[in-house]
Image (tube, grey):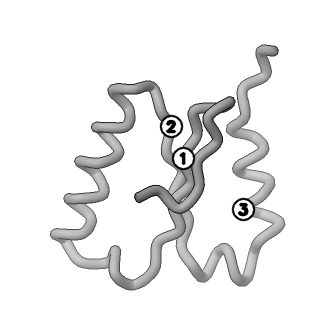
């Protein structure tokens, strides 16, 4: 399950905690990102710490990723 998804932008947001630090979890994340990419869904990943301590920066990064075409 995705943490957040915006269908209008075909943009998925994942907020990763310590459970994503292992090699097997990173491999799973990579495979899932590739799967979503086949549907032209872009995935942005952020660490929990970034969301908690730099929310403004995270939101700016998300905003920058929005398409500029109407």
* Extreme residue toward the top, this view: 70
Left-right relation of 56 to 20: right
Q: Distance between the residues labelled 3 and 1?
A: 13 Å
Q: Residue at x 48, y 33 (%)?
A: 41
Q: How far apart are marks 2 and 3 (CA)?
A: 16 Å
Q: How far apart are marks 1 and 2 (CA)?
A: 6 Å
Q: Cβ–Cβ below 8 Å for labels 1 and 2? A: yes
Q: In this view, does 36 lie above or below 29?
A: above
Quadrant of the rendered structure where residue 18 is? bottom left
Q: How crowded is mark 3: few (under 14 residues within 10 Å), some or many (20 or more)?
A: some
Numbered disc in front, either 2 or 3: 2
User: 62 or 4: nearer the eye?
Assistant: 4
Of callouts 2 and 3, which one flags the residue occurring earlier in the amino acid sequence? 2
Numbered disc in front, either 3 or 1: 1
**Which residue is disc 2 drawn over?**
42
Left-right relation of 7 to 3: right
Q: Residues within 10 Å of mark 2 (few under 14, many from 20)?
A: some
**Which residue is disc 1 drawn over?**
12
């Amino acid at each position: 399950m995705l943490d957040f998804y915006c269908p209008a932008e075909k943009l998925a947001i994942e907020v990763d905690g310590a459970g994503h630090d292992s090699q097997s979890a990173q491999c799973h994340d990579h495979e899932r990102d590739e799967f979503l990419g086949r549907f032209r869904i872009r995935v942005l990943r952020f660490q929990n710490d970034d969301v908690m301590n730099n929310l403004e920066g995270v939101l700016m990064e998300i905003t920058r990723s929005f398409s500029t075409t109407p």
